[in-house]
Image (cartoon, rainbow, N blue to C red):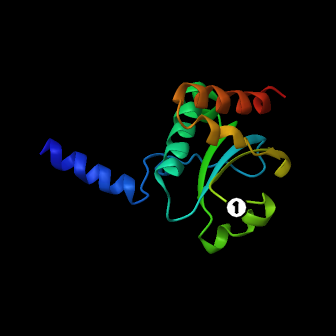
Amino acid sequence: MKNIMKSVFFVFFMAGGTVASDTVVENKPENDSIIVYYFHSTSRCVSCIKIEKWSYDAITDSFPDAMKEGKLVWRPTNIDKQENKRFIKEYTLFTNTLIVTEIKKGKQVRWKNPDKVWQFLRDQEQFSAYVTQEIRSYLAE
């Protein structure tokens, strides 16, 4: 039974399923918050899935209070869905991408693409430190 469950999880994960995508914290647009988007397509490679999982882990481990209070929002977003196509142009997306954006009084005031996540795919500790640092700089201001 244990091996069957492992196989089911592996197939789910390889097919693009992810536990992190089920954990979206909604915010109201009028709230001041930092939103961390993970933009992905329907089809994803192992590295793309890893970026989502490691980003989610870094955020939830480092900022649980900010997430609980709605100051920090994790939002995986499938850009293949029609309602999300606008993000491709807005953030100049050409691959699966992590974007950190600040919302004040319902308006986006700044955003950045922590594009070095791809460089740290062989080291989860460095990856997490980088993502945490990028988000912390937004929360601090």
Is residue 5 rendered to the left or right of residue 55?
left
Residue 62 lies, in percent from the top left, at: 59, 25
The amino acid type found where label 1 is placed reads Phe
Between 65 and 112, the one nearer to me in the picture: 112
Mark 1 nearby-residue class (10 Å; few <14, some 14–19, many ≥20): few
The local secondary structure at tag 1 comes to loop
Residue 75 lies, in percent from the top left, at: 61, 50
Q: Is residue 100 visible?
A: yes
Residue 135, compared with residue 90, is above or below; it is above
Is residue 110 rendered to the left or right of residue 58?
right
Between 13 and 61, the one nearer to me in the picture: 13
Residue 131, compared with residue 106, is above or below; it is above
- Residue located 54% across and 45% down the image: 52
Is residue 63 rendered to the left or right of residue 42?
right
Give the labeled residue for mark 1: 94
Name the quarter where the N terminus is drawn.
top left
- Residue located 76% across and 30% down the image: 139
Is residue 45 rendered to the left or right of residue 77?
left
Between 41 and 59, the one nearer to me in the picture: 41
Figure quadrant of residue 117? top right
Q: Is residue 104 visible?
A: no
Residue 24 lies, in percent from the top left, at: 55, 48
